[in-house]
Structures are given as structure tokens and as C-alpha cells.
Amino acid sequence: MDNAVDQHDIERLNDKDKAELRSFITNEQQRTRIQSQTHNLTDMCWKKCVTGPIKSGTLDKGDSTCLANCVERFLDVNIATMKHLSNMRQ
Amino acid sequence: MDSESVKRAIIKQVLTESNMANARQLIEKINDNCFDKCIPKPGSSVSSSEQTCITQCMEKYMAAWNQVNSAYLRRIQQEVGNNGGL
């Protein structure tokens, strides 16, 4: 990359910019975590919800509702699992 | 480079890489799922009906991604509001 940053450049960062970068990285990590989870969820829910042959490039009402429900129920399971595990630990 | 331009270069580089990674993941999933849907029995070439299916499947998959993403974000926001996050 033409404008790649090396160790020498990083040493030029002042404290204010370092702090800004830290919070940028934290946000970016959260954003990519959500995006990555969206990829997994879409893959999983596509397989459950889009079962017939592809007849158009848009989602019909049924697909759309199923996808939203799929996400909600998956997260219900996620939360239930965590609650159960935390009860077991006590 | 001064501090400001080092910072900007880092931000730019991180964004470029994470957007690339995101696109790569999407392409991989579209390939898997649309191949599965549109080419049930691979023939000696891609037929025109399979080609139509692939194009529509890509569009539909991206619409599904957006739908899932907004349902997911909505739920995260709701959970954060309830008890400080998942």
C-alpha cells in the first residue's frame, strides 16, 4: 500500500490522536462484530425462510416476516442460554 | 507525516480493510447459498434460467442481509435499553 503506516509513523501520534484512535478502533470492532453476526444470521435464516425456488429479486411479505422472526427467536435462544448458564454457575 | 495525518491514514486503512472483509464475507455467502438454490444439478454450462436465478438470488440475498441487519440492530438497541446489553 502506498500510504501504509509504519512503526515510525505511529510514534508521531500525540496523546489526543491516540485517544481518538482508541475509541475509533473500539467502535470499529463493535461494528464489524455486528456485521459478522449479521452474515451468520442471514445465512442461517435464509436457509430457514427462503425455501422455495427464486422467482424474483425482492423479498416477498412472507420471507420478510420470517427473516425478522428468525432473528428475534435466535436472540431469544441466545439470551435464554446465557441466563441458564449464569444460573448454573451460582 | 504529522500526528493528524498519521491518524487519518490509520483510520482510512482500517476502514478499507474492514469493508473489504465485509464484502468478501457477503460474496462467499451469496456464492454458497445461490449456488445451492440455482444450480441443483450442475450441467455442462450455466443455462439462461440458471443465470436469471443467480441474478435474482443475489439481489434477494442482499435484501435479506439488510432485513436481518435492521432486525438485529433493533433488537440490540432494545436489549441495551432493557438491561445494559447482550
Image (spheres, coloured by chain):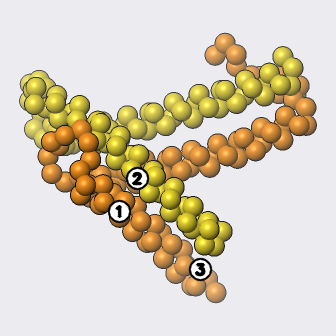
Chain colours: A orange, B yellow
Q: Amino acid at mark 2?
A: Val
Q: Position of residue B82 (x, y in %)?
A: 60, 72
* Disc 1 to disc 3: CB gap under 8 Å: no
Q: Position of residue B9 (x, y in %)?
A: 73, 23
Q: Quadrant of residue B14?
A: top right
Location of mark 3 (residue): A86
Location of mark 2 (residue): B68
Q: Is disc 3 in the same subunit as disc 2?
A: no
Give me the chain letter of mark 1: A
- In the rendered structure, the answer to whether residue A27 lies left or right of residue B21 reads right
Quadrant (top left, top right, bottom left, bottom right) of the N terminus of chain B: top right
Q: Residue at x 29, y 36 (%)?
A: B59
Distance from disc 1 to disc 2, alpha carbons, whole Å, reads 9 Å
Mark 2: give few (<14), some (14-19) or many (20+) Cα within 10 Å. Answer: many
- Element carrying mark 1: helix
- Element carrying mark 2: helix
Disc number lying in front (1 or 3): 1
Q: Amino acid at mark 1?
A: Cys
Q: Residue at x 30, y 54 (%)?
A: A64
The mark found on residue A70 in the picture is: 1
- In the rendered structure, the answer to whether residue B20 lies left or right of residue A21 reads left
Front residue of B57 and A56 = A56
Q: Is disc 1 in the same subunit as disc 3?
A: yes
Q: Position of residue B61 (x, y in %)?
A: 31, 42
Mark 3: give few (<14), some (14-19) or many (20+) Cα within 10 Å. Answer: few
* Disc 1 to disc 2: CB gap under 8 Å: yes
Front residue of B14 and B70 = B70
Q: Is disc 1 in the same subunit as disc 2?
A: no
* Extreme-right residue of the structure: A15
Give me the chain letter of mark 3: A
Q: Residue at x 64, y 87 (%)?
A: A90
